[in-house]
Image: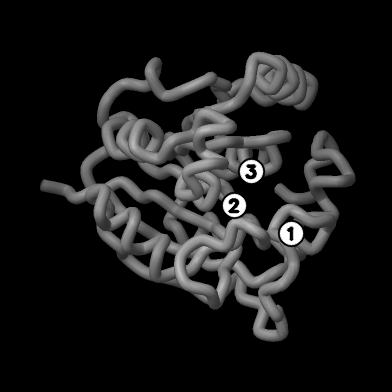
Amino acid sequence: MLDDPSRPDADKARDAGSKPLEVYKWLGIAEGMTVGDIIPSSGYNSHILARVVGEEGHVVSVFTSDDGKAGLDARFSEAGISNVKVLLNLDEVPDGSIDAFICVRNVHDMLMPEVAERYGIQPDPILGAIMRTLKPGGIFGVVDARTTKDGADTDTHRINEKMMIAELEARGFELVDSSELLAKPDDDFSQPSWEGDGRYTLDRMLLKFRKPSH
């Protein structure tokens, strides 16, 4: 799947650090599922997920701009991918229709008030919509850059793992498990999470939450 010739070289350069197939497997994402990719950016995860879930599965690539949607639609059309639906928000997604969501390095922005306000990604509407559209027992997988500081570090756009867990649990998600798959023991936590290729290799948390089944 990662050697898919329709994937850009820039995406392939991320694979060693992002470990997408290992992340999806750990989250339990498999063929035939309907999976949501929250704030998909250029479509790195959505593209691979489309291959992972296969022809019987679906990917909802959601929370982008009008220009972003046009770019993603063009990307998937050119790649011959027909099982990805690109949406501006989750309003069009039926309640309880998604098996799993992933959000890679974006939840921290929702939890930084000034950033959330600037980009229109306030946490309660988005996380509430994720909860609404997940099936009971559905998975919410979060990848984000860690800091050893308390709370959210606005200078580096990293977030304390305990804060992340507390914020999501306060909104009704249940923590299932955590993984050190994306850990980087020699990270000194000073590098901004958006900076260069290091954003794909710095120390990151990998958390598996779920929507309560009752």
Q: Earlier in the sequence, mark 2 or mark 3?
A: 3
The amino acid pointed to by label 2 is: Arg
Looking at the picture, how far across and down is residue 68, in whole percent?
A: 69, 22
Q: Earlier in the sequence, mark 3 or mark 1?
A: 3
Under circle 1, the secondary element is helix
| Residue at 46% from the left image edge and 38% from the top image edge | 35
Q: Is residue 89 above or below residue 122?
A: above
- Foreground pick, 92 / 100: 92
Q: CA distance from mark 2 to mark 3?
A: 12 Å
Q: Which residue is mark 3?
A: 45
Q: Is residue 37 above or below residue 163?
A: above
Q: CA distance from mark 3 to mark 1?
A: 15 Å
The disc at residue 199 is 1
From where the camera sits, is residue 192 visible?
yes
Q: Quadrant of residue 95?
A: top left
Looking at the picture, how far across and down is residue 2, in whole percent?
A: 75, 50
